[in-house]
Amino acid sequence: MTPAPVAHAALIVDFDSPSALILIVAAAAALLAAVVVGRRIPGGIGAAAAMGVTVPITVFGLLSLEARRAGAGTGVDHAVLGWLLARRTWWLTRLAIMVTDLGSPAVVAALTAAAAAAVWWQTRSPRNAIVLLATVSGAATVSTVTKHMVTTQPPPVADRVIELIHQSGPSFPSGHATSTLALAGIAAVIVGQPRSRGVRVALAAGAAVVTLAVAGTRLYLGVHWLTDVLAGLLLAGTAVLLGSAFLAPRYFTHAGPDGSMMKSAQPR
């Protein structure tokens, strides 16, 4: 009798499986993003930026594999959900519902269109407006494709605020977290380009607060796992870094030969 083969799931990768496809796509995306950013931003800053996009893509790929393996939340996901369930209150739930709506597809789409129009009008150039639209729509598209590749089930219906929040289909990654950070992040970068370091820090902090508020409500309302939200933030952060590499050159003012203020392009 021929002995039955022993499966070593942790060591042998089935390259016909969706998990292998996820791994290959993540590796290819990390390499491509690093090359693009490295070429767009020369020098030491470019190398740092290339590493900055490679790391989150790699972690995103690993989270995707873990989420697919778990199927319906990891042990940590269930522990976080249980902790939040025990701390729900009626007023916090109402507040969470209002905040989470800020990251809904309809609201993000409307805000993205308005922001792109404002950027175009302010700069008199379509380049940054196109980058903003591409960053948000690109992140949302990758999020949707990933959902159908990973096919993770959302938290149980009994744990959701089902009367007011409806979640259907795969949950990984969180679309709300992805779209909110993609829009807030690239908008903060564009608005802060010609301004002082203090203003840029304030804009980044504002984008972080809005993003964390929306992302937190997805956990509190029981419509996403922690891994869903973390993956959405990693995906959006990568999109913002990539988008930033394609923005128009920054401008700064300096004193001309006659003492008047002149505007010049800052080398990138």
Image: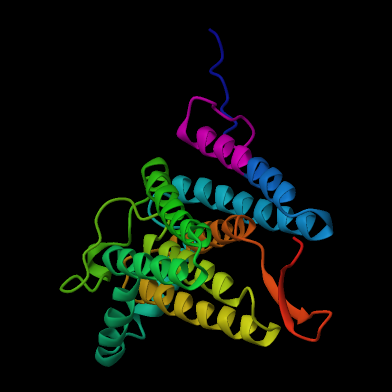
The residue at the point 58 percent across, 57 percent down is 238
Name the chief secondary structure element in magenta.
helix
Q: Quadrant of residue 158?
A: bottom left
Q: Residue furthest top?
A: 1
The number of discs equals 0
Q: Quadrant of residue 53?
A: bottom right
Q: Residue furthest left?
A: 163
Q: Percent position (x, y) of residue 165?
A: 22, 70
The residue at the point 54 percent across, 27 percent down is 14
Foreground of the two, 160 or 132: 132
Q: Does residue 92 show up magenta in the picture? A: no
Left or right: residue 70 versus residue 91 is right
Q: Does residue 23 show up magenta in the picture? A: yes
Foreground of the two, 130 or 72: 130
Q: Percent position (x, y) of residue 62?
A: 58, 49
Left or right: residue 47 versus residue 177 is right
Q: Residue furthest bottom?
A: 91
Q: Percent position (x, y) of residue 78?
A: 42, 66
Q: Percent position (x, y) of residue 139?
A: 46, 54
Foreground of the two, 120 or 99: 120
Q: Which residues are magenta?
A: 10-29
Colouring mode (rainbow / by chain / secondary structure / one colour): rainbow
The residue at the point 56 percent across, 28 percent down is 7
Q: Residue furthest front?
A: 258
Left or right: residue 19 versus residue 258 is left
Residue 247 versus residue 85 in the image, above or below: above
* Quadrant occupied by the C terminus: bottom right
The residue at the point 64 percent across, 46 percent down is 33
